[in-house]
Amino acid sequence: MSSVLYDAPGPRAKRRNVFISVIFFALLALLVWFVWDAMNEKNQLEWALWKPFTESQAWTTYLLPGLADTLRAAALAMVIALPLGAVFGIARLSDHLWVRLPAAWVVEFFRAIPVLLLMLFANEAYDRWANLTTEQRQLYAVVTGLVLYNASVLAEVVRAGILALPKGQSEAAKAIGLRKGQTMRIVLLPQAVTAMLPAIVSQLVVIVKDTALGGVMIGFTELLSTRGTLAAAYGNPIASFVVVAIIYIVLNFILTSFASWLEKRLRRSKKSTGAVLSAEDMEELNPAATGGTFGTGAGGSI
Amino acid sequence: MKLRKASAAAAAALVLSLTATACGGGDGDNEGGSGSGGGDKIKIGIKYDQPGLGLKEPDGTFSGFDVDVATYVAKELGYDADQIEFVETKSADRENALKRGDVKFIAATYSITDERKKSVDFAGPYLLAHQDLLVKTDSDITEATDLNGKNLCSVTGSTSAENVKNDFAPKANLKENSGYSECISSLQSGTVDALTTDDSILAGFASQEQYKGQFKLAGLKLSNENYGIGVKKGDTETLNKINAALEKMVSSKAWDKAVTDNFGPANYKNEPAPKIGVIVQ
Amino acid sequence: MFDFLSDYNNPTLLGAFWMTVKLTVISGLGSLIWGTLLAAMRVSPVPLMRGFGTAYVNIVRNIPLTVIIIFTSLGLADVFGVTMGASDFQVRGFRLAILGLVAYTAAFVCEAIRSGINTVPLGQAEAARAIGLTFSQTLRLIILPQAFRAVIGPLANVLIALTKNTTVAAAIGVAEAAYLMKGMIEKEAQVLLIGAVFAFGFVVLTLPTGLLLGWLSKRLAVKR
C-alpha cells in the first residue's frame, strides 16, 4: 500500500528522487568501502582465509554435519511441539474453566521465559538426573528448550487458527448434530491446520535461529559450534562467521519464501474457507486481538 | 482427513528434513557406550579444537599431542589405530563422560586436580604444562605484572584469566571470547595484548601454518598443569595399563617425537617427560 | 534456602537483572528509532531506499541473534574498530550488545510499523495528498501517528521478545541474568530453585509490560 503515500513523481520529484538516491548510494558505497578497507587492513581478505570454503573438506568435515544437527534439532522440536501446542491451544478454547485456566497459565509461563534459560536449565537437569551420553544430553536439552517455548507459541497459533475460521463452520457442525469433540476433530482442526501452515513454517525459522543458542551456551554441535572447530583448524574465525551467517540467511530465506508461497496458494484455493494465518498475523498475535482470557501475550515470534 | 496438495507439500518437506538429517548426523549415537572396552572399538575422549593437542583436521582425521599419546596408549591396550573412535569431550563434559563409561579414557588437556580426583582417576601425568601468555612477536610483555592496564584475552568460563587477575595483574582488562581461535584473532588485530592459558595450547596455536612467526610465548610459569589421562573412578586395571603404556612411551622415545612433532616451531620449551604418579604442585 | 544467592557478587542477582533491564530499555528505544527509520525507508518514494530497507529486514531477520551479538564483538570491535568509546571490555561488551540488539530488533519493529501503516485507511493518505502535503509530511503528520496507535500491541510483543533476547548478551560476557544463572547452576546443588528464581524474574519483567501495553493498545486504538 506504500504507493498511496505519494503521487506518481513529476519532473521535480523525479529530480529530487535521483538526488536523494545518489546521496544514499554514496553513503552506502562509503560504508562498503570502509568495511572493505578495514578488513583489508586487518588482513581479513587474504585468500588463504576464504579458500577453505571453496574446498569440499571444510563442508563435509565441519559445516554439513553441523548443519545436519541444526536441522535435526529444529525438525525434532517442531514435530514434538506441534501436537503439544495443539493440545494446549484447544485446551485454552475449552468451555470448562478448570481446563482453560491451567492451560493458559502454562502457555503464558513458558512464553515469558527466555529459551536460553530453558535450555541451560534442561541441560543441567539432564546432566544430574538423567542417564544420557553427552551428545544425547545436548540434543535433548536444546530440543526441550525449543519445545517448551514453541509449543506455547504454537498453542496460540492453533487457537488463533481455530478462531479465524468462519463461525458458520461450527454452527453447521452443531446443526447436523456433531458433538463438541467431533466438531473440533472433524470440522475445525483440519481446516485450522491448513490455515496455520504458513505460520507454522515461519515458526520453523525462529526455531532454526534458536538452535544457535544451544551451540554457544551448552556446546551442542550445531552449525555455529562446528564453525568453532573449523576456525581452530583453518585459523579464520571472521571468515567462517561470515560464511555461517550466509548459510543461515539462505536456509531461512528458503523457509520464509516457502511460507509465503504456501500462504498465497492457500488464499487462492477455492476449496478453503479463505482463513489463513500468516507470519504477520503471528507478530500481531496478542490476547487483546484474539479475545484471550488474560496474560502477557508474551512472545511474538522473534 | 484428506490433506490438500499444499499441506502435503509442507508435511513432506518436514518429514524429508527429518529423515535426511537422521541419515546425515546420527550415526554412532546408538552403538552403546562400549565403555567396557569389549568388542572391536575403543572410544577415547579428546578435544576437537586445539591445534597441537587435539584437532579435527579437514580430512576428518585427528592430530595433536593428546591424540598421539592416546593412540600410543590404545595400541598398548591392544587396539590398532583403525579401532579407535575419537569422541569430542569439551571441558565441562569430561567427568560425566567418564562416569557414564561413554569413553574408555580421556586425553584432553586434562589437568590433575584434587577436585577432579574426587570423581575420576588419573593415569600419568604425561605432560607438565604451565599457564603462560601468548603475545605478538614484537611485544614487550615479559612478566605477568606487565599486564596491568593491558588487554588480556581468555575463553569464557576458563579459570586462567581469573588466576592472572587475582594473583598477578589485578588491573588487567579482561576480554572473554567464545574460543581460543577467536582470542588469537583479537590478538592479531591488536584488540588485546596477550592471550593466556596453558603454554601447550598456546604453542599449538602459534605453530599453526597461518600464524607462523607472528606470535611468541612469554615463557612464564604462572601455574603447573599436570596433564593426566582420565579414567573411570575405580577402574584400576585400565589405570595401571595406561601408566605402563605411558612409561613405555617415554622410555622408547616415542614421547619426545610426539612433542617435537606437535609443538615444534613456537619457542616452546617443553618440560622433560614427567614421572608417572609425580604431580608437580 | 536462599543463602547461596548472596554468595554471588559479580554480578549480584539484582545487579544481573538490573543489567537485563538496562539492556532492554536502551535497546528498546534504539530499535524503535532505527526501526521507524527503516519503515519510512521501506515505504519511501526512492527505490534505492526501499531496496535497502527490504534487504536489511530480510537479511537481519534470518540471522540468529547469537551470530549477530558475537559478531559485534569479534567483527565490529576487533576488525572495524567500533569500540563504542569504551576501553574496558565489560563496558564495551554492554554497549556492543545494545548495538547488536538494536540492529536485530529494529527489523521486527520495522515490520510491525509497516503492518501498522497498512491499517491506516487509504482515504487518510489520499486526503493528505489532496491538501498538498509532501511524502514526509504525510508520513509524519497523518500516517505514523495513527499507525503507532495501531501497533502498540505488536510492539509490546517485540519489547517482550527483546527482554528475553537480552539473555543472548551472555555469549559475549555481559553479566546479565542468563550469565549469572549459567554460573550458578554449574556450582550449586539447588538447580530447581535457581531455575525458579530466574523464571520468576523474567515473569516479573515481562508480565507487567504485556498487561500495561495491552491495556494501552486497547485504550489508544483508533476507533473505526
Image: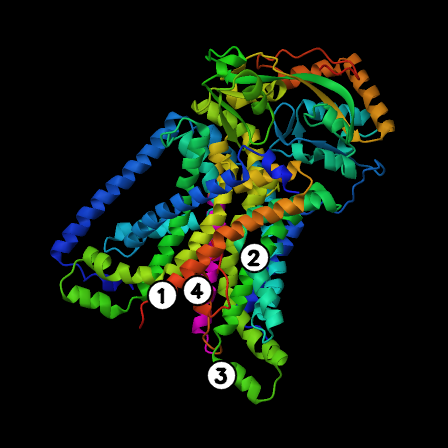
Q: Between B143 and B269, which is closer to the camera in this rendering?
A: B143
Where's the N terminus of chain A, which quadrant?
bottom left
Could you say whether the residue bearing mark 1 is in a helix, strand or loop? helix
Q: Evaluate whether label 1 is on the same chain as label 4.
A: no
Q: Chain of mark 1?
A: C
The chain identifier of the residue carrying mark 3 reads A
Q: Give the vertical position of A246 relative to B79 (above or below).
A: below
Distance from Cα at disc 3 to Cα at disc 1: 31 Å
Q: Give the mark toward the camera: 1 or 4.
A: 1
Residue B189 on image: x %, y %: 43, 24
Tell me if label 2 and label 1 are in contact, CB under 8 Å: no
- Spatial CA span between label 4 and label 2: 22 Å
Question: What is the chain identity of the residue bearing mark 4?
Answer: A
Which residue carries the number 2 mark? A109
Residue pointed to by mark 1: C219
- Pointer 4: what residue? A281
Mark 4 vs mark 3: which is more N-terminal?
Answer: 3
Horizontal side, residue C165 vs residue A40: left or right: right
Q: CA distance from mark 4 to mark 3?
A: 22 Å
Residue B264 sits in quarter: top right
